[in-house]
Amino acid sequence: MKTVLCYGDSNTYGYDPSSGMRYPEGVRWTSRLRKHLGGEYRVIEEGCNGRTTVFDDPLEGWKNGLDYLRPCLNSHKPVDIFVMMLGSNDLKTVFHAEPRDIAEGAETLVRDVIDFTKNKQGFVPWIILVSPPEIGEGIASSPFYGSFDEGAIERSRGLAEYFKLVAERNGCTYVNAAEYIKPSELDSLHLSPEGHRRLAEVIGETIQG
């Protein structure tokens, strides 16, 4: 059985924009991916609301994705496939991060995965780097407005270009989620059930060819 570790933020956790709670099993893209792949794969959900690539949130510093990465990899090793979708929270106004900065943060995590797994499990997993969906046009009316502003829309559109370069430099498989999904109109950040369904299809087809 192959282990697939899905490492991400609230859209990997399965945040439901209609309730502020969590989508149930069977709706989240990670659980749909498990069904798509079948019994030969074990899919591990490691999503955390607010997780960044390498930035320390001034109020919730424990959401830095780099800090938790090695303990996570060590807990679940051996990891055969590592799927990472981070970067949306790096677009918060508090970080003043441009697309290139965010991609560099993602690259720091990718290289840490490579170095750590090579040492601790004897092989590097297949890394699938997913550039996150764009911030929606309605962010100004979102409950998350303030943490994100209108400038995040355009900056989110610049992520795909840089994430692709990171994937190419580090031998990762690249997926641009924005080509397939958009955030819900409810908050311009989080996925609808349909978005989760489609993302699971895309990742599943990527893994199975």
Image (spheres, grey):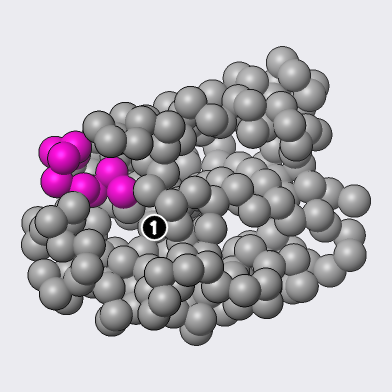
Which residue is label 1 attached to? 132
User: SS for tag 1?
Assistant: loop
Q: Between residues 99 and 151, which one lies in front from this camera angle?
A: 151
The residue at 25%/32% (across/down) is 58
Residue 190 makes an appearance in the image: yes
Where residue 35 appears, as percent x and y from the top left, is 77, 72
Residue 92: say if magenta: yes
Q: Position of residue 62 (x, y in %)?
A: 43, 32
Drawn side of residue 205 relative to residue 135, left or right: right
What secondary structure is the magenta-colored segment mainly?
helix
* Residue 136 in picture, x, y percent from top left: 23, 71
Count all numbered tags in the image, as a single digit. Answer: 1
Nearest the viewer among 107 and 97 is 97
- Whether 65 is drawn above or below 153: the answer is above
Instruction: Determine crowd level at label 1: few under 14, some 14-19, many 20+ residues with C-alpha closer than 10 A.
Output: many
Give the residue at x 63% y 63%. Answer: 30
Q: Residue 21: x, y in percent?
A: 47, 68
Q: Is residue 25 left or right of residue 20?
A: right
Quadrant assignment, res 23:
bottom right
Residue at the spot 14% in from the left edge and 74% down from the top edge? 141
State whether residue 9 is above or below residue 39: above
Location of the C terminus (image quadrant) = bottom right
Q: Quadrant of residue 60?
A: top left
Q: Would residue 182 be seen by someone viewing this image from the given angle?
A: no
> Which contiguous range is marked in magenta?
89-97
The amino acid pointed to by label 1 is Pro
Magenta-span inclusion, residue 90:
yes
Query: Which residue is located at x 67 percent, y 72 percent?
Result: 25
- In the image shown, does 141 or 156 lie closer to the viewer? 141
